[in-house]
Image (cartoon, grey):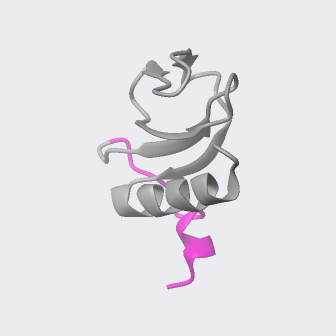
């Protein structure tokens, strides 16, 4: 399956959803469960409000989220 098509599929409320965000303070890419309100950055300690964070990937597949997170981290300087 083409990975770009996965983003077009609707996500049902009953499924666990994962998001990949970037810490606004130190730019470290992070993964979190979408139903969390906040996520602490392990690098700088900032508490990130997930409702206001820019989401780079939203998926119900945790492996997809981890793979995308790895790609982002490899492309960052941290």
Question: What secondary structure prevails in the magenta region?
Answer: loop
Answer above or below: position of 29 versus 43.
Answer: below
Q: Quadrant of residue 48?
A: top right
What x and y, as percent, mark residue 64?
44, 63
77 and 59: which one is in front?
Answer: 77
Q: Residue at x 44, y 35 (%)?
A: 34
72 and 52: which one is in front?
Answer: 72
78 and 64: which one is in front?
Answer: 78
Q: Quadrant of residue 50?
A: top right
What x and y, as percent, mark residue 75?
68, 58
Question: Which region shows up in magenta?
Answer: 1-13
Q: Was residue 46 drawn as part of the magenta stretch in this picture?
A: no
Q: Decide if residue 54 is on the left or right side of residue 33.
A: right
In the current view of this chain or complex, which residue is farthest to the bottom?
A: 1
Q: Quadrant of residue 52?
A: top right
Answer above or below: position of 75 versus 18.
Answer: below
What x and y, as percent, mark residue 24?
69, 26
Q: Was residue 7 drawn as part of the magenta stretch in this picture?
A: yes
Q: Decide if residue 40 is on the left or right side of residue 78.
A: left
Q: Residue at x 62, y 29 (%)?
A: 23
Picture quarter with the C terminus: top right
Answer above or below: position of 66 versus 42.
Answer: below
Q: Residue at x 56, y 75 (%)?
A: 3
């Amino acid at each position: 399956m083409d990975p770009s098509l996965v983003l077009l599929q609707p996500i049902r409320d009953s499924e666990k959803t994962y998001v990949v965000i970037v810490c606004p303070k130190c730019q470290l890419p992070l993964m979190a469960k979408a139903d969390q309100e906040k996520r602490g950055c392990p690098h700088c300690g900032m508490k990130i409000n997930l409702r206001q964070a820019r989401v780079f990937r939203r998926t119900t597949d945790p492996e997809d989220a981890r793979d995308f997170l790895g790609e982002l981290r490899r492309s960052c300087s941290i």
